[in-house]
């Protein structure tokens, strides 16, 4: 799996654009009920937890695939790379599914809560989310796994050179 499909990229781009549009169309001086904002913050916290869980799963699956690639190429071990690739595919699907709710919870918080104190956590998370998604789309999982494999090779190469 080299890159995300164009439909997924367009959908994620649309969600990002809509969330920005919703955030800009609000009136910051409009009074908002504190319970609504606290509910939206709870929803944002839940979306952040789900996103971080999915991101961790994807990162871990990518690391395991990189380790398996390294071991099979360098160590000449017979490792089932197909199962590692399947793990990455499942983790990628979970990660992509977590992106939409994350963006929508940030957009809802920005749209319905006029106070900056409520919006601050959503804005910080959206910046991190944008960076993660951009990196994921631009590099792809295979490139990330290859980079991690190179890092693993470097670590083991450094250890071998120190042992000599």
Image: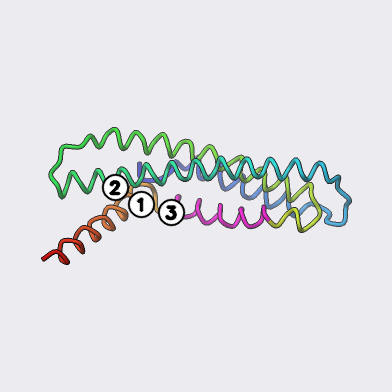
Does the CB distance between marks 1 and 3 fall below 8 Å? no
Q: Which residue is mark 2?
A: 66
Horizontal and vertical percent position of residue 122? 67, 52
Q: Marks 2 and 3, how far apart in space?
A: 18 Å
Q: Nearer the viewer, mark 2 or mark 3?
A: 2
Q: Quadrant of the N terminus?
A: top left
Give the SS element for disc 2. helix
Q: Marks 1 and 2, how far apart in space?
A: 8 Å
Left or right, 54 with reference to 18:
left
Horizontal and vertical percent position of residue 28? 83, 56
Dot label at residue 49 = none
Q: Quadrant of the C terminus?
A: bottom left
Q: How many neighbours does mark 2 have within 10 angstroms: few (below 14), some (14-19), or many (20 or more)?
A: many
Viewer-nearest residue: 141 or 11: 141
Quadrant hosting residue 83: top left
Q: Earlier in the sequence, mark 2 or mark 3?
A: 2
Q: Which residue is mark 1?
A: 144
Q: At 41% from the left edge and 46% from the top edge, which residue is drawn?
A: 59
Horizontal and vertical percent position of residue 82? 27, 34
Q: At 78% from the left edge and 45% from the top edge, which residue is drawn?
A: 37
Q: Which residue is mark 3?
A: 138
Does the CB distance between marks 1 and 2 fall below 8 Å? yes
Q: At 78% from the left edge and 52% from the top edge, which residue is drawn?
A: 25
Q: Is residue 130 magenta?
A: yes
Give the SS element for disc 1. helix
Q: Tell me the magenta residue range.
A: 121-138
Does the CB distance between marks 2 and 3 fall below 8 Å? no
């Amino acid at each position: 799996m080299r890159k995300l499909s164009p439909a997924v990229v367009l959908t994620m781009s649309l969600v990002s654009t809509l969330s920005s549009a919703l955030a800009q169309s609000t009136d910051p001086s409009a009074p908002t009920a504190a319970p609504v904002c606290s509910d939206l913050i709870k929803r944002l916290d839940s979306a952040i937890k789900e996103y971080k869980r999915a991101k961790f799963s994807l990162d871990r699956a990518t690391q395991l695939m990189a380790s398996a690639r390294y071991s099979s190429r360098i160590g000449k071990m017979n490792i089932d790379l197909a199962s590692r690739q399947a793990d990455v595919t499942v983790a990628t699907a979970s990660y992509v599914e977590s992106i939409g709710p994350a963006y929508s919870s940030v957009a809802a918080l920005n749209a319905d809560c006029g106070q900056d104190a409520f919006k601050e956590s959503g804005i910080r998370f959206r910046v991190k989310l944008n960076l993660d998604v951009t990196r994921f789309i631009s590099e792809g999982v295979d490139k990330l796994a290859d980079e991690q494999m190179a890092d693993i090779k470097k670590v083991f190469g450094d250890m071998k050179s120190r042992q000599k």
